[in-house]
Amino acid sequence: MSESPILTARHGRVGFINLNRPAQLNALNDALMDALGEALLSLDQDPDIGAIVITGSDKAFAAGADIAVMADWTYMDVYQSGFITRNWETIRQVRKPVIAAVAGYAMGGGCELALACDIIIAAESAKFALPEIKLAMLPGAGGTQRLPRAVGKAKAMDMCLSARMLNAEEADRYGLVSRVVPDAELQTSALKLASQVASYSLPALMAIKESLNRAFEGNLSEGILFERRELHARFASEDAHEGMHAFLDKRPPEFTHR
Ligand code: DAK
């Protein structure tokens, strides 16, 4: 029996998903993307989970779409089966914060998967690239859209047109990742960050994630209006009242995620 393409674990209110095709540097195939989507949706629906971490191995977060599988596909194969759309975009449905903990290669679809997460925390060994041009392909899982939003047009064009690979320090400087940590500390740092996030009120986290993502969807006025309505909605939550009263009472809040 073949090994599961992902492994899952729970640490308190954090759900961990480990991509698990080490011999192929976690190259993304349908079995892996189906399992990842299923795990993400299951954790998203679990009331005892407040944040999710996706990680890979020491050598690779994921080296991209599985080239061995794609090499002989035809246009009709990918068009009719809805390649990418069918199961790569499940992550967009997740309403809880998702953190990518990246060590080693995050290339092609692997880099795009990290970009689809809400926060990227990188080990010093992390390397980011969209090298599809070398295969006469193009980034097709959101890379041409999310990368320029993260690093700006000039850097994104450079990476996509020349296949330039960024190391962790460059990725940090360009705003692709939010923090860089020593390799040995990646998992503990990701867990610490995710645990902190997950300790906050879940509906507030979801509202922040949804509001922030709006910044990349529409114009400023609409975004501000959306944010204002989300803020008003906080006054209907028990946690917001608890948070403010706890501050005034000089005690830690006890959130019920309601
Ligand atoms: N797919 C399949 N196998 C891969 C792979 C990949 N992406 N990356 C690595 N592997 C396999 C290697 O073939 C090798 O297998 P064996 O020979 O041992 O059987 C094993 O993993 C170890 O790799 P290497 O021996 O190459 O390891 P190195 O340390 O020497 O090099 C590397 C590491 C990451 C620099 C190198 O493996 C590499 O360049 N890998 C390919 C990276 C890449 O080009 N990624 C982009 C893939 S294309 C689409 C939408 C989206 C996409 C496509 C279509 N449509 C809507 C139609 C997305 C495309 C991509 O992501």
Image (spheres, rainbow, N blue to C red):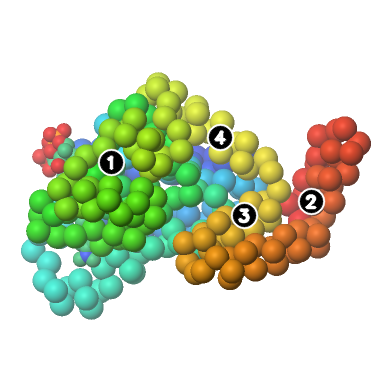
- Of residues 180 and 65, the one nearer the viewer is 180
At mark 4, the secondary structure is helix
Residue drawn at 25 percent across, 62 percent down? 140
Which residue is identified by label 1? 128
Q: Is residue 235 left or right of residue 73?
A: right
Residue drawn at 64 percent across, 51 percent down? 205
Which residue is identified by label 2? 239
Which residue is identified by label 4? 193
Q: Is residue 42 visible?
A: yes
Number of residues whose C-alpha sits closer than 10 Å to that of mark 2, classed few (under 14), some (14–19) or many (20 or more): many
The residue carrying mark 1 has its beta carbon less than 8 Å from ligand 1: no
User: Percent x, y for residue 241?
Assistant: 84, 51
Which residue is identified by label 3? 208
| Label disc, if present, on residue 216 of the rendered structure | none
Residue drawn at 35 percent across, 51 percent down? 152
User: Percent x, y for residue 108?
Assistant: 24, 50
Q: Is residue 112 left or right of residue 192?
A: left
Determine the CA span between mark 2 and mark 1. 38 Å
The quadrant holding residue 182 is top left
Q: Inspect the image, locate mark 4, and give the three-letter code of the amino acid beneath it.
A: Leu
Number of residues whose C-alpha sits closer than 10 Å to that of mark 4, classed few (under 14), some (14–19) or many (20 or more): some
Determine the CA span between mark 2 and mark 3. 14 Å
User: Percent x, y for residue 43?
Assistant: 54, 52
